[in-house]
Image: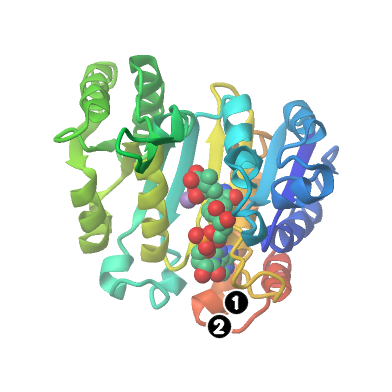
Amino acid sequence: MLIALLPGDGIGPEVIAQTRRVLEALSIDSLDFEEALVGGAAYKATGHPLPPETLDLAKRADAILFGAVGDPDCDALERHLRPEQAILGLRKELGLFANLRPAKLFPELADASALRPEVASQIDMVIVRELNGDVYFGEKGMRTTADGKREGYDIMSYNEDEVRRIARVGFETAMARGKKLCSVDKANVLETSQLWRDVVIETAKEYPDVALSHMYVDNAAMQLVRNPGQFDVIVTGNLFGDILSDQASMCAGSIGMLPSASLDNAKKGLYEPIHGSAPDIAGQGKANPLATILSAAMMLRYSLDHAQEASRVEAAVARALAAGARSPDLGGSMSTQQMGEAVLEAL
Ligand code: NAD
Ligand code: IPM
Ligand code: MN
């Protein structure tokens, strides 16, 4: 099995290095790694954030382990050359439309959460975020209005097939958990969301055992901090899912703790922490690698048929935390490498 390692920018290479050590320590037969440049690092070396060789490796690989992209040096580039285009391009080119972002509080981290411990301890949910559509991929541009003003625009749209396939992932995810699905939209204002809601309701007929509810995104943002324990599975669009998952991460202790899987309809997947390249702490050994290590566990489970090893990695993370492993984001002072070593030791 071939794993494409795409470390990227900022703290990406730091968290990927620790994750690779954990994967290698599992001694799984026939696990090969091949690394390629992506994001700002790829732009600086080749002039393109997603070079053809990198896309080719991603296509050939059984799974992709991705660090993060984003580099302040590149913020002034034309949009198609910016590092972020690499992750958007991979998601689109590989048809990775279903993004699973589980948010769960490890009991040891109750004090790290931005919420009161008794509220935080309830969080155990999955955000199912659509990843190939929405305002991210609609027509966008800058133009000049008739009266000479600059105007930016980004078209938001979903068609019913796109909504139905992600709704099914939401229902299936709920079926495998607590059988509660909350669809988050802005149907009171957006036509895109009205279609979303209609199609989710139609799809619910295929899943009579799932309790479906609907919530406007502004209320959902509030409910996430008021009482995150009410959610089992949330299904939502690309933009709302992006925002709500960062928020959920702080309910669960830190943005450095949340993993993700981006899946197609088969077994191919890209696995990455939900956080970015964190330029403010890059190169200082301060990044928490656990979100990436937990993403590798998702990779073992969903793409590599190694559910047992996935559970071993997750248990090792829990044991490392129980033994006191804390990076700065969790209120401690351990380095990225020491956090990786704590997981290795627990393994
Ligand atoms: P960010 O997630 O990189 O950082 C936000 C804050 O969280 C920062 O203070 C950072 O230090 C902290 N943080 C993030 N990950 C951490 C970790 N593992 N351990 C400890 N602290 C951590 O978001 P941002 O600052 O808005 O964006 C920085 C760059 O990353 C931008 O270029 C952005 O486009 C990019 N980005 C990329 C991805 C991705 O590659 N999938 C995701 C989000 C942001
Ligand atoms: C994420 C990031 C990306 C997104 C950016 C970097 C394109 O924020 O993976 O959550 O918005 O999807
Ligand atoms: Mn994001």
Determine the quadrant in which ligand 1 lies: bottom right
* Viewer-side label of 2, 1: 2
Which quadrant is home to the C terminus?
bottom right
What's the residue at 30%, 71% (across, down)? 115
What x and y, as percent, mark residue 173? 40, 34
The residue type indicated by label 2 comes to Gly
What's the residue at 48%, 38% (across, down)? 99
Q: Is residue 4 left or right of residue 293?
A: right
What x and y, as percent, mark residue 235? 33, 36
Which quadrant is home to the N terminus?
top right
Look at the numbered disc 2 and give the secondary structure of its residue: loop
Q: Mark number for residue 332?
A: 2
Residue 111 sits in quarter: bottom left
Q: Along the polypeptide, which appears first: circle 2 or circle 1?
A: 1
Gap in Å between the C-alphas at discs 2 and 1?
8 Å
Residue lying furthest left: 188
Q: Is residue 128 left or right of residue 20?
A: left
Label 1 environment density (alpha carbons within 10 Å; few <14, some 14–19, many ≥20)? many
Say how the picture is coloured: rainbow
Residue 147 vertical position relative to residue 60 in the rendered view, above or below: below
The residue type indicated by label 1 comes to Ala
Q: In this view of the protein, can residue 273 be seen by the observer? A: no
Verify CB contact (< 8 Å) between mark 2 and mark 1: yes
Residue 86 vertical position relative to residue 171 in the rendered view, above or below: below
* Residue named by callout 1: 325
Look at the numbered disc 1 and give the secondary structure of its residue: loop
Q: In this view of the protein, can residue 4 be seen by the observer? A: yes
Residue 321 vertical position relative to residue 333 in the rendered view, above or below: above
